Amino acid sequence: MRYAVLGTGSVGRTISAKLASLGHDVVVGTRDTQSTLARTGTGSAGQPFSAWLRDHPAVDLAAFAEAAGRADAVVNASSGATSLDVLAAAGAENLAGKILIDVANPLDFSAGTMPPPLNPVNTDSLAEQIQRAYPAAKVVKTLNTMNAAIMVDPARLPGPHSVFVSGDDAAAKQAVTQLLISFGWPPPSIIDLGDITTARGTEMMLPVWLGLFGALGHADFNFHIAGARRPS
Amino acid sequence: MRYAVLGTGSVGRTISAKLASLGHDVVVGTRDTQSTLARTGTGSAGQPFSAWLRDHPAVDLAAFAEAAGRADAVVNASSGATSLDVLAAAGAENLAGKILIDVANPLDFSAGTMPPPLNPVNTDSLAEQIQRAYPAAKVVKTLNTMNAAIMVDPARLPGPHSVFVSGDDAAAKQAVTQLLISFGWPPPSIIDLGDITTARGTEMMLPVWLGLFGALGHADFNFHIAGARRPS
């Protein structure tokens, strides 16, 4: 499969590296390739993007529209507050008919309050906004309830834990479920919540995730649904 | 201890029965005892309140203010949309200085949409509203992220799972933690998230709880935080 991963932060890098390690064709999408390659700051991702790209020679870099246009499936790994702009730059014609895996959370840092509130929230979600804006894309919300390292390496945590899937297209959810299994997720850990409106629920887990991050002092945890499978 | 449990629904009944079984003095608070005892409908709680009360002779019934006034600690087991009214009827003077265990969720059924949205949400929580309205009470938010049967019998689910505690008063949280342990919660399962603002996070777990209830077809599940305790 040819994947476009929109976003050059730690989530985009982690997912891109995993996809490439599984033999997929991966192109990272960014707004302007020259300025992305010219950045020298390391941010939270640990190294400048150009250095990361040198360490991952199988991964390509392109502008959002070119990246999405070349791909069979697109991963939205941009920060949630920018996602709609990023997808607009990618272009509806480059998203139509494709699976669009949305792993972003609409944390609103503009208010300056910590923890940041969500926007949208409660009666809407980022995933629904994206599906409404790109009705020809097959949006699947998943992986947004955990740290990037866990997304692609669930075995790093002891015991079972869960990943949620929301979306309107059953075949797209099935394909994403297969991708999650290839990432190392045991099938019983993958919970299909239903249609795209159920993404409200998983996006609204972010505040307690942030609370746990503060209380535990680390991000190496994940939600597990105990009792999800009844004894038969 | 003398407990007042405000609310006659399944959550109030379940917690009252557990407290009484542990030897505590329990009085259930309601708006009007005569009309509560006159109700013949079973609702979701399975039997009319009068029949339940006959089956639990150690539990008393009183109006909100009398119930709270007689108690050392108060449990808010009213439905979230009514909680501020219920506590106003209980009276600030009957809550002052006491632990107020808030297990309610502010689900807003007035809009008629399913799943019901939360109100307040995101930048506020019911627990914070209660703490602001009754600054002399020691509000502790807990147990609001699971079905009533699990609150008082965590062993009914296989494997470890979690209960969260939020509040501004450390001694009150410690007392509630001891109560949770007496309910059967293993100490490592009890996660102190921090001050009362962290209740936003646990109240905002309700939408995914409702999504899981719909997807799984039952309520006998709970959240576990895998990896919360790092291997030492």
Image: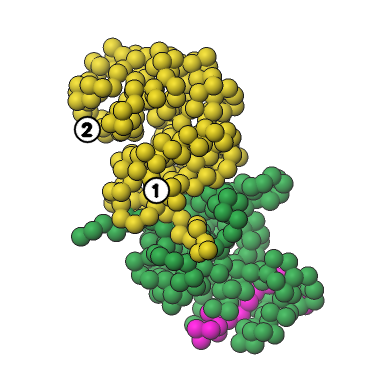
Chain colours: A yellow, B green
Residue A98 vertical placement versus B44 (above, below): above
In-image side of B164 versus A50 (left or right): right
**Is disc 2 surrounded by few (<14), some (14 to 19) or many (20+) residues within 10 Å?**
few
**Is disc 1 surrounded by few (<14), some (14 to 19) or many (20+) residues within 10 Å?**
some
Q: Secondary structure at mark 1?
A: loop
Q: Which residues are magenta?
A: B19-35
Residue A194, position in %: x, y? 58, 43
Residue B169 vertical placement versus A165 (above, below): below
* Residue marked by disc 1: A186
Task: Specify the amino acid type for callout 2.
Answer: Gly
* Residue marked by disc 2: A46
Residue B88, position in %: x, y? 63, 64
Per the model, the C-alpha gap separating discs 2 and 1 is 29 Å
- Count of numbered marks: 2
Residue B122, position in %: x, y? 51, 44
Q: Secondary structure at mark 2?
A: loop
In-image side of B32 versus B119 (left or right): right
Along the line of sight, the residue nearer the viewer: B145 or A1:
A1
